[in-house]
Amino acid sequence: MVNPTSPVTRVLVFGAHLAWVVPTLFRMSTALMTDHYELTMLRAALRSGAAHRRVVFEVFTRALPPGRRFGVFAGTGRLLAALADFRFGPDEIGALLAAGTVDDATAAWLADYRFRGEISAFAEGEPFFAGAPVLVVEGTFAESVLLETLVLSILNHDSAIAAAAARMVAAAGERPCIEMGTRRTHEAAAIAAARAAYLAGFTASSNLAAARAYAVPSVGTSAHAFTLVHPSEADAFAAQVAALGADTTLLVDTYDVTAGIAAAVAAAGPQLGAIRIDSGDLGALALAGRAQLDALGATDTRIIATGDLDEHAVARLAGAPVDGYGIGTSLVTGSGAPTAGFVYKLVAVDGEPVAKRSVGKGTRGGRKRVLRRHDPAGRAVADVVLPAGVPGDPHPARVEGGASRDRELLVRVMTGGELADEGLIGPAGTRRAREHHALALATLGPAARDVRFGQPCLPVVHAARP
Amino acid sequence: MVNPTSPVTRVLVFGAHLAWVVPTLFRMSTALMTDHYELTMLRAALRSGAAHRRVVFEVFTRALPPGRRFGVFAGTGRLLAALADFRFGPDEIGALLAAGTVDDATAAWLADYRFRGEISAFAEGEPFFAGAPVLVVEGTFAESVLLETLVLSILNHDSAIAAAAARMVAAAGERPCIEMGTRRTHEAAAIAAARAAYLAGFTASSNLAAARAYAVPSVGTSAHAFTLVHPSEADAFAAQVAALGADTTLLVDTYDVTAGIAAAVAAAGPQLGAIRIDSGDLGALALAGRAQLDALGATDTRIIATGDLDEHAVARLAGAPVDGYGIGTSLVTGSGAPTAGFVYKLVAVDGEPVAKRSVGKGTRGGRKRVLRRHDPAGRAVADVVLPAGVPGDPHPARVEGGASRDRELLVRVMTGGELADEGLIGPAGTRRAREHHALALATLGPAARDVRFGQPCLPVVHAARP
């Protein structure tokens, strides 16, 4: 179909080569990653004139998942990158016109569109609680309403995974957790899940695309198929050690764990890096495996437990001689809470608060600020939500307890549609989120590390302006 | 940063324009959407020689999610498209070498790699049950093991959503279901979810990218924000009707449903297309709303119910005067089962069966066939799994009950790495899967339409070769 010697092909190949070198110049638009009704609202609002009103949208959740102590705000870095590509090109506009979704006036408006407003957000990695806005979008109704679906998709997914990951990390204590869930979720969601797990404290991931995109350390050695494709387990282990060195991890449960451990140490010697056990009673097998390894002189060989683990299974293994956990399905599906429940609600129009009164889904009008209040020892004691006054109010309201121990949680990340800081995206943003998460979590106290069903570990207080 | 008049910029702009026109030529590689260990296994197997053995991998699930009557096999169309892009270019290989994941010999092998083997699969949309292989990959160990993670990511995600969607469609009976979950899942997973829901019987989706990529019909009108941004509900409704016509759907629960319905009919007249109710007691509100609409002469105006619906809520609304359902969160999270539980297991090496014996995770060796057996009335009675003999065996084994009423479920979709039929991918593949699903589901009988917790509605029989 393609003639490799034609001039057109050479240009295409040149273009494809540039796409490797400068992929950001060939990014695909994210503009159709949205709901049909965002476009019909735009169309009707352009006609009514409401499109040009100055508005404030806030993102918040009405409740944490049942029993959860805290949420973890994640996805900002991915969202800010996706917003840069939220542009309607000829392809997108043509599709919308052909389907009758938009009219010519709306199409013309979309061709010039990029978001030019303001976004403030919690730091990525920040623990959050129900009822406090975690992200605020300010701009015209038209430019802001279009972002709703993409904002929610990214934040709801990434925050759900990060919150589950934080619980697993808490249950694991000092032992490392490795993310292995790529095969249990959508292939692109898997990349975001690896990133979210890493920022919430996982040490590595199996996902190679996450390593490439976000510098998440990737790890992995072999599966049962590798053992099965060789004539014997001993042959497989010898082949793996020959290629990857004695410091590798050998998977010992393909046939019989005791025989597998003996074969593993025979193949690699007592310098064997680790064994992995993926089935059976992991606690009992780890105990027996540790004794067997020690008896064979492999006293530094670690034991990695994998296979249907979640935070509760990890907690039950705390007393077993396990040196690390590989966690898949439960992590990438949010451990029972696969979406964070964020909504994107209009709270102000032309400076005036607005709110809906839908049963069970009412909203609080007006733009807000959120302060995390700490006691003199630095422990967080409450998140205080208070009116923000006019947009961009440079004078933070005073809060009882001393402003010096309050931390303003909503921080500007986009001004006039421009990224406030390139360090918020890519590998740098991921690393920064991981560091922030660890620091902020440490202020929450021991209840945050309890993975049993319980109450949120910090109250949210809705304060009137003092 | 970019000078728009420079030759380089003009080439880039030309390339970007081509990217709109011929996006398939600028497709991104999917090769890093995989687990680290697939590459280390390849590296070790190239060194040991096992890489070149002829193998068979089978995809199956050990169990359906608790209480489910059947699964729905989905994702083939997306998988076959992704496999075409599963190539290691300079960017991917450079990243793998830099990270030390592969050595030079492996890198050289990857540069020439594309899958050249055979894939057989259930028809997309086919109901499936635990223990029967739904997809079979045949090739060398090296070329086949590399596909594991991508195959599982796509099939596990799409099949989980399709299975949940089929239950909602069953509960809705003749009433249409609209997919609205984009904001509750990863932004790319949302596109696949809309596709999976459509093939399992949903009539439309809110997702514009799914409309573009797979011709899933997209729908949508307005959210509460549209009402709130206007001075009054009446103004908002008038604006929407002016832009979208009287046949639109007006959202009536922003303030008060009764007042909202009155305002809706006042704005659009009795020709109003539909009202949408998104909160409160949907059954009671639909009953009262129907009476109010009828009294206002809007007897053809439909009532659409949305808001935290799942198959059980839909079933409870069967007696209420609801004309359609919009379903979001529960659908895109698989209604409690967000991943299908498929595994990818080595079952044969150089023609000989292999199997692991891991506790609770044992496998059945040998390549298999699957026949769906029907009674004389055409109702499915069992899925029969039997040895396939040599790969490509042209003589189907005879099965008691008459071959004429047996349907071979595993069908070749890729031969020598080439797609068997272009109609399996894109919009055509999606439409075909939707048609196949409806036909195949009809043979399962009434138990398949029962959304209560229960047993699988068809047994899987493991038969020896007759």
Image (tube, coloured by chain):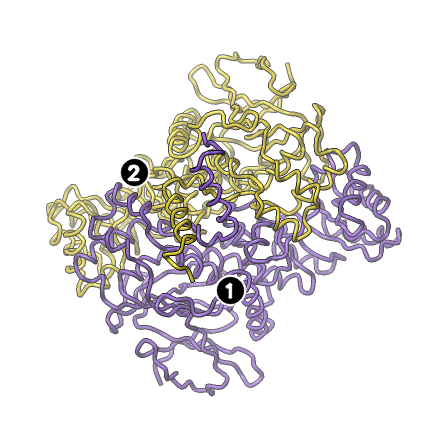
Chain colours: A purple, B yellow
Q: Which residue occupies the foreground of this view, B371 or A428?
A: A428
- Label 1 marks a residue whose chain is A
Q: Position of residue B304 (x, y in %)?
A: 26, 46
- Tell me which corner region of the image, top left, top right, bottom left or bottom right, holds residue A132: bottom left
> In this view of the protein, can residue A279 be seen by the observer?
no
> In the image, is A249 to the left or to the right of B153?
right
Relative to B460, A225 lies left or right: right
Q: A223 or B413: nearer the eye?
A: B413
Helix, strand or loop status at disc 2: loop
Q: Is residue B191 above or below residue A323?
A: above
Task: State the residue position of label 2.
Answer: B175
Camera-near label (1 vs 2) is 1
The residue at the point 61 percent across, 24 percent down is B368
Q: CA distance from mark 1 to mark 2?
A: 39 Å
Q: In the rendered structure, which amino acid carries the disc numbered 2?
A: Arg
Q: Is residue A200 above or below residue A93?
A: below
Q: Residues within 10 Å of mark 2 (few under 14, many from 20)?
A: some
Circle 1: residue type:
Val
Tag 1 secondary structure: strand
- x then y, percent, for residue B14: 38, 47
Residue B347 position, x and y percent, is 67, 30
Q: Is residue B14 visible?
A: yes
Q: Quadrant of residue B311?
A: top left
**Drawn side of residue B306 relative to residue A383, left or right:** left
Image height of A339 relative to B103, above or below: below
A382 up-or-down from A347: above or below: below
Q: Which residue is mark 1?
A: A72
Q: Quadrant of residue B349?
A: top right
